[in-house]
Amino acid sequence: MVYHIGARPVSGDYTRLTLFKDGYDTQSFGAKSHDYPEEIFVVKGRLYDKAFGVWLEAGEYASRPPFEVHGPFIAQGDVVILEMSYPSQSVK
């Protein structure tokens, strides 16, 4: 479930909260990358990032530069992620 907190229509930048229910696995979507930076903060829970082979824990922050591969993800417990994405800073 995704809750959009704010978006800037002109730039396309946005902030949102994403909820992953316990056990949710994004394997069917595969790993992702995009041409803009994003930042995430784990508000609640524990999320496994298969691309890095690490658990992201509540209170942890990650900054992803353009084109960095991340995911798929597996949720342990219900997980809430605060995501700030900056499409206005796309690298073409």
Image (cartoon, rainbow, N blue to C red):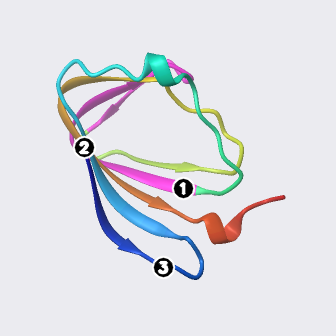
Circle on res. 8: 3
SS assignment at label 1: strand
Look at mark 2 in the image and give the residue it sits on: 1
Point out the image quarter for the C terminus: bottom right
The magenta segment: 38-57
Label 1 to label 3: alpha-carbon separation: 15 Å
In the rendered structure, does residue 46 fall within the stretch colored magenta? yes
Look at mark 1 in the image and give the residue it sits on: 38
Residue 45, x across and y down, in percent: 19, 34
Q: Residues within 10 Å of mark 2 (few under 14, many from 20)?
A: few
Amino acid type for the residue under numbered disc 1: Glu
Q: Residues within 10 Å of mark 1 (few under 14, many from 20)?
A: many
Residue 7 horizontal side relative to residue 20, left or right: right
Name the N-terminal-most of marks 1 and 3. Answer: 3
Label 3 to label 2: alpha-carbon separation: 21 Å
Work out whether 80 lies above or below 38: above
Residue in view at x 66 percent, y 51 percent: 65
SS assignment at label 3: loop
Residue in the foreground of this view, choosing between 60 and 45: 45
Amino acid type for the residue under numbered disc 3: Arg
